Image (cartoon, rainbow, N blue to C red):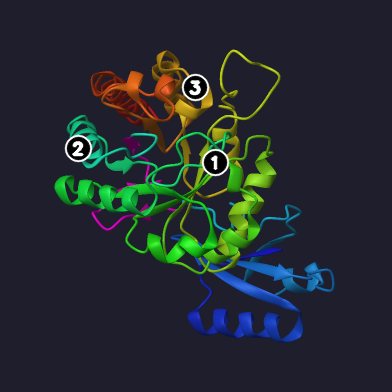
């Protein structure tokens, strides 16, 4: 249930009303204070609450029941967009376009630092790179693990770019203390114990949609993190599994406006994993920006043919530079013509 208060509601009235609700009913009341109104989100068993009685209160403007099972991620509880700001001032969800770029997996210091410098020169604000790699085959390269994290931090020191990298298990959380954004991959989207532990951190979490997950399931996974107290969640559409086999996955671009309608959380798109083909990344990146994405996460490798992981979907630095120029130009045009 959400309760919209009238603009003239005083701080004393707000506090008193919240206490009344929590004392009289088995609910927790979350408060969102916007520019023009204050919204109270009631979480718990609201069946015993008389809507007519609540509506009759002098300070109440509107009362609505919320049917969706996700509450904290729901735009009805939080009408304005969530903006996540990193330590270097980069903002995700503020109406701009954030580019995250880098190798699928960290292979060496020279490799990751070289790519970091290249993508930064092309306008990327965040360096992506895999230290721990979940692979379908147990014989495939699994990443450099802790060494890979150290190499990403070396690249951050050289370029100033914040880093985003994937976590695999709860026991690794302490290792990610100096990571700027923790990524939860598609295979772990419903690893609820991991999500609960990440909810206790204060780190931005990049949550990728599962291979065969619905939009509601993605939002419910975000809810697990937010229920633990961490509201810094970034949703990522990275393609879903369908009967189509030409591409690695099927990029669900409709998920972008749908998610932005249902939730206040930032939404980014991964065209690399969505298609599995480097020549499709540019067109899908443009389409994602046109659909309203807050950012893109793109794989870039200095020598894709020799990459230890996902070379077929990786752009060269030169190709990324071209894509970055096009998507930034499109975003500028869209913002100017809203």
Mark pair 2, 3: CA separation: 25 Å
Q: Is residue 30 magenta?
A: no
Instruction: Please tell me whether residue 159 is drawn above or below residue 20 in the rendered image.
Output: above
Badge 3 crowding class, 10 Å Cα cut-off, few under 14, some 14 to 19, many 20 or more, is many
Residue at image mark 2: 110
Residue at point 63%, 15% (across, down)? 245
Residue at point 56%, 83% (across, down)? 15
Helix, strand or loop status at disc 2: helix
In magenta, the rendered stretch is 82-102
Helix, strand or loop status at disc 3: loop
Residue 271, how many percent across, how many down? 46, 26
Residue at image mark 3: 276
Query: As drawn, is 294 to the left or to the right of 226?
Result: left
Instruction: Please tell me whether residue 268 is drawn above or below residue 310 in the rendered image.
Output: below
Residue 228, how many percent across, how many down? 57, 68
Residue at point 46%, 41% (across, down)? 142
Residue at image mark 1: 260
Q: For marks 2 and 1, give the one nearer the viewer.
A: 2
């Amino acid at each position: 249930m959400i309760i919209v208060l009238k603009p003239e509601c005083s701080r004393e009235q707000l506090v008193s009303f919240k206490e009344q609700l929590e004392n009289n009913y088995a609910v927790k009341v979350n408060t969102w204070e916007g520019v023009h109104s204050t919204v109270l989100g009631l979480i718990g068993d609201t069946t015993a609450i008389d809507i007519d009685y609540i509506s009759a209160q002098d300070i109440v403007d509107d009362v609505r029941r919320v049917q969706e099972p996700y509450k904290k991620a729901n735009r009805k509880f939080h009408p304005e967009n969530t903006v996540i700001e990193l330590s270097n001032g980069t903002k995700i969800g503020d109406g701009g376009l954030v580019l995250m770029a880098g190798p699928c997996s960290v292979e060496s210091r020279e490799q990751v630092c070289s790519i970091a410098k290249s993508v930064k020169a092309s306008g990327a604000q965040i360096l992506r790179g895999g230290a721990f790699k979940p692979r379908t085959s147990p014989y495939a390269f699994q990443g450099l693990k802790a060494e890979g994290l150290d190499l990403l931090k070396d690249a951050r020191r050289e370029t100033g770019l914040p880093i985003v990298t994937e976590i695999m298990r709860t026991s690794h959380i302490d290792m990610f203390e100096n990571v700027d954004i923790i990524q939860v991959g598609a295979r772990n989207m419903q690893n609820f114990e991991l999500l609960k532990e990440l909810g206790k951190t204060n780190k931005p979490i990049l949550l990728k949609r599962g291979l065969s997950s619905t939009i509601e399931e993605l939002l419910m996974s975000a809810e697990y993190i937010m229920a633990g107290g961490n509201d810094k969640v970034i949703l990522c559409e990275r393609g879903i599994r369908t009967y189509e086999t030409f591409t690695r996955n099927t990029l669900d671009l409709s998920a972008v406006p749908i998610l932005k309608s249902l939730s206040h959380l930032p939404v980014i798109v991964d065209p690399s994993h969505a298609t599995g083909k480097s020549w499709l990344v540019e067109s899908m990146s443009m389409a994602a920006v046109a659909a309203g994405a807050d950012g893109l996460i793109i794989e870039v490798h200095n020598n894709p043919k020799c990459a230890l992981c996902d070379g077929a979907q990786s752009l060269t630095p030169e190709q990324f530079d071209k894509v970055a120029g096009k998507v930034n130009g499109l975003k500028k045009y869209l913002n100017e013509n809203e």
